[in-house]
Image (cartoon, rainbow, N blue to C red):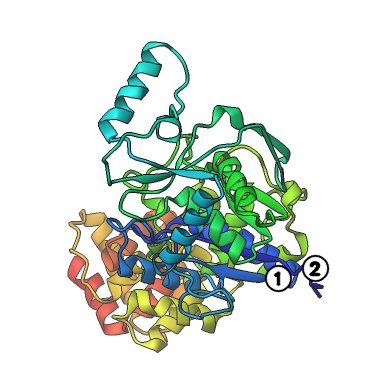
Amino acid sequence: MAVPEDPPVRVRIAPSPTGFAHLGTASTALYNVLFARQTAGTFVLRIDDTDMERNRPEYEALIYESLRWLALDWDEGPDKGGPHAPYRQSERVDIYREEAARLIKEGHAYRCYCTPEELEAERRQAQAEKRAYKYSRRCLTNPPEGRSVFAVRFQVPGGEIRFTDMVRGEMRFDADLIGDFIIVKSDGYPTYQFASPVDDARMEITHVIRGEEHLSNTPYQLMLVDALGYPRPQAYAHMPLILARDGAKMSKRKHPELNLAIYREQGYLPEALLNYLALLGWNPGTEQEIFSFDELLQSFSFDRVQHGGARFDWEKLNWINGEYIRRLSDDELARRVQPFVSQLDADTIRRAVPALKTRLHKLADAVGYLDYLWTDPPAPSLDEETSLRVRAAADALKPVAWEPEPIESALEKAVLESGVSKGRFYNPLRDVLTGKKVALPIHYAFALLPKDKALSRLERAA
Ligand code: GLU
């Protein structure tokens, strides 16, 4: 039993609803949920929707849907409420404006009236002089007169920023390298860099667990937390990036595996995907690869999370998924396969399951194994010798009871009588029956099709 920490652990994810639900969101959510459940803490879902041009409510709906599918349930969130509502950043804009006004008043931030062209000129100048660019602080020291459009910039105090990362240990950043950055844009909306630490502080988040791409944001956010006078989160954990198989960075456009919907569509079991995601960035230190959620709760710890990027490997995912499929009861597998083969009645699906179980890597594979039951395959043209064997098979099957075992023994007898190998005998039968090179064991393939249909396919071909 997890015992609550003092102060109680509060973690969060803050996905942005700007596209399909992302694999990285599932992975980050998993680590947050594991830590929250291990510490009897609270898991908050915050919707980071301050990018007014790219947010869509339907993308937000996809985030909820995919997290629910994975059973990564949150304790507080836009749809659930909670003590720090609202949990959508677009509904918290007044809070950010107040906090920015406070920073200005206390001398930690200032209005910047520079135009994009002026800033670009500064940047180019720095480039020409071969120095790293930092904003010149012109609007702090000598603001232009008579302008009304402004952004708000944070006045970076500089110095060294240190924090504890549960994955990487003690981290240090040199804030002297960081220029004064924008916290409120000229349209009045906060930047991510500002809204995120304000919310983390006000929502009393104790541990920030997120992707490695945010590691370099942490010093920015800590300086803001300090300037606002809030206590810092106790610790951070920056989880490895999920990379393509070849180690390249993945992009939403080129890598469909980033889209969570495809796992559901192809019939990955949510519990198998979680198992895979856990192992993607974390190493249990043993040979064990199959972990139930409860076993993950027992075993997971941040000190065994790898530092480098994690390469996505379909083969391993397929293997894990196949293992989970084989561990399902026949009734449960039938229930899960049903939506993929809705052309079939429940009884046929149930009879197919024992054979399917040994073959499936993912539930959608069932379609390829079973579609011969609802579509007639094209009749192959057979040479004379093969035709005779197909006819012999038809004759052998005519009198048998239509069940896998009697079919199997009748076929085995026919193989012996034919004098050819099992493979030579069965391959054309499989082809005639299913139109496929790969199919269920042949006696199952026959038994699942009504007897008259199966025999007429053989006879037609012979
Ligand atoms: N909206 C950010 C993202 O989805 C949140 C990052 C964070 O957790 O601070 O990457």
Give the residue displayed 47% in from the left and 64% down from the top: 95
- x then y, percent, for residue 392: 32, 69
The residue where tag 2 is placed is: 5
Q: Image point 30% across, 70% down: which residue?
A: 371
63 or 384, nearer to the observer: 63
- Spot the residue most to the top: 129
Q: Quadrant for residue 241, please give it.
A: top right
Residue 413: horizontal and vertical position, in percent?
46, 69
Q: Position of residue 75 (x, y in %)?
A: 59, 76
Quarter location, residue 461: bottom left
- Left-right relation of 27 to 290: left
Whether residue 121 is situated above or below residue 374 in the rendered picture: above
SS for callout 2: loop
| Tags 2 and 1 touching, CB below 8 Å | yes
Q: Is residue 45 above or below residue 54?
A: below
Label 1 secondary element: loop
Percent of width and height locating residue 277 = 57, 56
How many numbered discs sit on the rendered protein?
2
- Amino acid on which disc 2 is placed: Glu
Quarter of the picture containing the C terminus is bottom left
Res. 241 visible in picture: no
User: Gap between marks 2 and 1, in whole Å?
Assistant: 8 Å
Q: Nearer the viewer, residue 282 or 198?
A: 198
Quadrant location of the N terminus in the rendered image: bottom right
Residue 41: which disc?
1
Q: Is residue 25 above or below residue 76?
A: above
Neighbour class for label 1 at 10 Å: few (<14), some, many (≥20)?
A: many
Residue 315 visible (yes or no): yes
The tag earlier along the polypeptide, 2 or 1, is 2
Give the class, few, some or many, for how many residues have Cα within 10 Å of label 2's Cα (few <14, many ≥20).
few
Please report the residue visible at 26 percent of the width from the left and 55 percent of the height from the top: 385
